[in-house]
Amino acid sequence: MQTTYYNTPIGTVKISGSEKGVRSVTFLEKTIQPSSVIPDCLKNCVIQLNEYFTKHRTTFNLKLDLQGTEFQQKVWGELLHISYGKTKTYLEQAKALKNVKAIRAIASANGKNPLAIIIPCHRVIGSNGSLTGYAGGIWRKKWLLEHEKALNQQTLF
């Protein structure tokens, strides 16, 4: 397993993966120096994250090495259907998964998403529009949603 550190506008992320694909992108609570050497298997991830943060990318095209239960992987797969600049409620996500009774389990699986930003769990909000839950912190969720909304507004004209 290879690791690299990348500084984003909202903090440092630790990126892990191998030739099988990117396994995790997680926010750290402290800023550290970015890696001076990026392993080949993670270079494309760093490039695509940089493009995302500079508003040159709205979707990711990465080889992923997801580690999770079958249920978690199903939930994370559904997150990939939420378009850039859009949001979906936890209830809408549960309906899309055809399992409204599992809304809490779905929310829990979202919280265990190992690929912040890449699998956009930040695009899931409460039914009343509140920014409920985000493993990276609510302030980061708000920032990411505003970042994506700003690009959508710019492309209207």
Image (tube, helix red, strand yellow):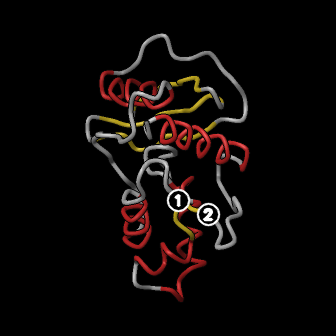
Q: Amino acid at mark 2?
A: Ile
Residue drawn 40% across the image and 78% down it: 97
State the image coordinates of residue 135 (x, y, percent, origin top left).
65, 52
The residue where tag 1 is placed is: 87
Residue drawn 69% across the image and 71% down it: 128
State the image coordinates of residue 62 (x, y, percent, origin top left).
30, 39
Q: Which image quadrant is residue 12 in? A: top right
User: In terms of sequence position, does the residue under pointer 1 or pointer 2 come before the other?
Assistant: 1
- The span from disc 1 to disc 2 (Cα, nearest Å) is 7 Å
Residue farthest to the bottom, as pictured: 101
Q: Quadrant of the C terminus?
A: top left
State the image coordinates of residue 67 (x, y, percent, origin top left).
40, 56
Disc 2 secondary structure class: strand
How many residues crowd around disc 2 within 10 Å: few (fewer than 14), some, or many (20 or more)?
Answer: many
Q: How many marks?
A: 2
Residue drawn 56% across the image and 17% down it: 34
The residue where tag 2 is placed is: 125
Disc 1 secondary structure class: loop
Whether 137 is drawn above or below 40: the answer is: below
Residue drawn 54% across the image and 55% down it: 123
How many residues crowd around disc 1 within 10 Å: few (fewer than 14), some, or many (20 or more)?
Answer: some
Whether 51 is drawn above or below 155: the answer is: above
Q: Quadrant of the N terminus?
A: top left
Q: Are marks 1 and 2 in contact (CB under 8 Å)?
A: yes
Q: Amino acid at mark 1?
A: Thr
